Image (cartoon, rainbow, N blue to C red):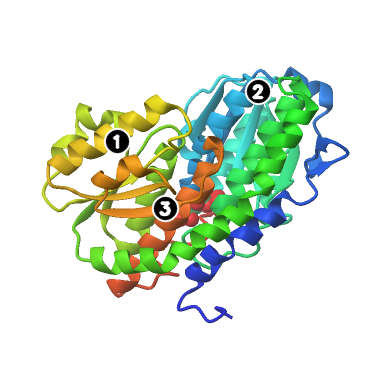
Amino acid sequence: EKGGHEYFMLKEIEEQPDALANSLRGHFAGGRIVLDEQRISDQDLRDIDKVFVVACGSAYHSGLVAKYAIEHWCRLPVEVELASEFRYRDPVLDRDTLVVAVSQSGETMDTLEAVRHAREQRARVLAVCNTNGAQIPRESDAVLYTHAGPEIGVASTKAFLAQIAANYLVGLALAQARGTKYPDEVGREFADLEAMPKAVEQVLTTVDQVRDLGARLADSKAVLFLGRHVGYPVALEGALKLKELAYMHAEGFAAGELKHGPIALIEKDLPVVVVMPSPRGRAVLHAKLVSNISEIQARGARTIVIAEEGDETVRPFADELIEVPAVPTLLQPLVSTVPLQVLAAEIARTRGYDVDKPRNLAKSVTVE
Ligand code: F6R
């Protein structure tokens, strides 16, 4: 049942191209993005003036990634918030607010309560969910199902990638309704998404290299993760995976924050994973990260760099280089997250832990 794999998580990591392809299938028809159950009228969708994404854990990170795309495509303000925090604030919500609730299980209590709170305030709620008929989609105004298939490993992998893709579909549906993108542009963005399963397949060819690296890092006391722009939530996700699976201290930072504190943590041999943006994207972003890596390397840290293939500028600063294929900037998290999943799983395995069932954690958290 593990398909020849030592643990489910590795099998599920390898299923990610299918999880993406299945989650995109059928959502672009007749030149338009189509969601699943859409009980929000086109007019109401057009009137949306603010978006909240509420979720927990990895699902929350998928929202942080999507914020970049939705703001860019739709020119709408997007706030991403932990469901457990959202409901105890007094968030400003009304009929023109879209609340996107992202949940693999569809049963996470904090997210469900956030949905209820949002609906009481008459906000429109759209659920992104991997489980048919679960409570969160049942209580929402619209639903977009991810089709990652059942996820057995407690740590989310394929569901996380599918959540990013689904959140992007929500962004494109909004851009289409608001007219901030022409139909042919929406079609092109969708085609870029459709090319991602192939790109992820290519990343999977680095699994052996990353497993080997993981085995060598298993004795580390801590690992730091740095990123900028969409690479920042990827860094947070990489750190979360390592904490929950390997019980290792791990933290993700926005690389620009280094000099505001975290650089004090850098010491000799500390592994620091850096998620590089594409050198073909915004040059300033890339240059700033190169300078961040050189600073931490100068302080003796062990730099592990996830970079686009052919990015020669980072080579001198990378003690370990993991190459990912070139994809559009906003889609990079779909490739750069994959090595971080493998890394966390392999460090955990080497330390002798059950990768599929980390201690103290449950697959679906139905208590607050
Ligand atoms: C981390 C992980 C958790 C879940 C979180 C939300 O690997 O799996 O952080 O992402 O508990 O769960 P769902 O998506 O079911 O609401």
Q: Nearer the viewer, mark 2 or mark 3?
A: 3
Query: Which label sits on residue 323?
Result: 3
- Residue 29: x percent and y percent? 85, 42
**Quadrant assignment, res 235:** top left
Work out whether 230 lies above or below 130. above
Residue under numbered circle 2: 74
Above or below for 148 versus 90: below
- Say what secondary structure mark 3 lies in: strand
Check if mark 3's residue and mark 1's residue have beta carbons within 8 Å. Answer: no
Disc 1 marks which residue? 290
Q: Is mark 1 within 8 Å of ligand 1?
A: no
- Quarter of the rendering containing residue 128: top right
Q: In the image, 240: left or right of 163?
A: left
140 relative to 15, above or below: above
Q: Residue 61: image x %, image y %?
A: 48, 42
Mark 1 is surrounded, within 10 Å at the Cα level, by few (under 14), some (14 to 19) or many (20 or more) other residues, namely: many
Q: Residue at x 26, y 58 (%)?
A: 248
Question: How many neighbours does mark 2 have within 10 angstroms: few (below 14), some (14-19), or many (20 or more)?
Answer: many
Quarter holding the N terminus?
bottom right
Q: What amino acid does circle 1 point to?
A: Val
Q: Nearer the viewer, mark 1 or mark 2?
A: 1
Q: CA distance from mark 3 to mark 1?
A: 15 Å
Given residues 136 and 131, the one toward you in this image is 131
Q: Secondary structure at mark 1?
A: helix
- The residue furthest right is 30
Q: Is residue 256 above or below residue 154?
A: above
Label 2 element class: helix
Place of residue 274 in the rendered image (x, y in percent of width and height, measured from the top left): 32, 44
Distance between mark 2 and mark 3 Cα atoms:
31 Å
Please give left or right for residue 173 compared with residue 307 in the image.
Answer: right
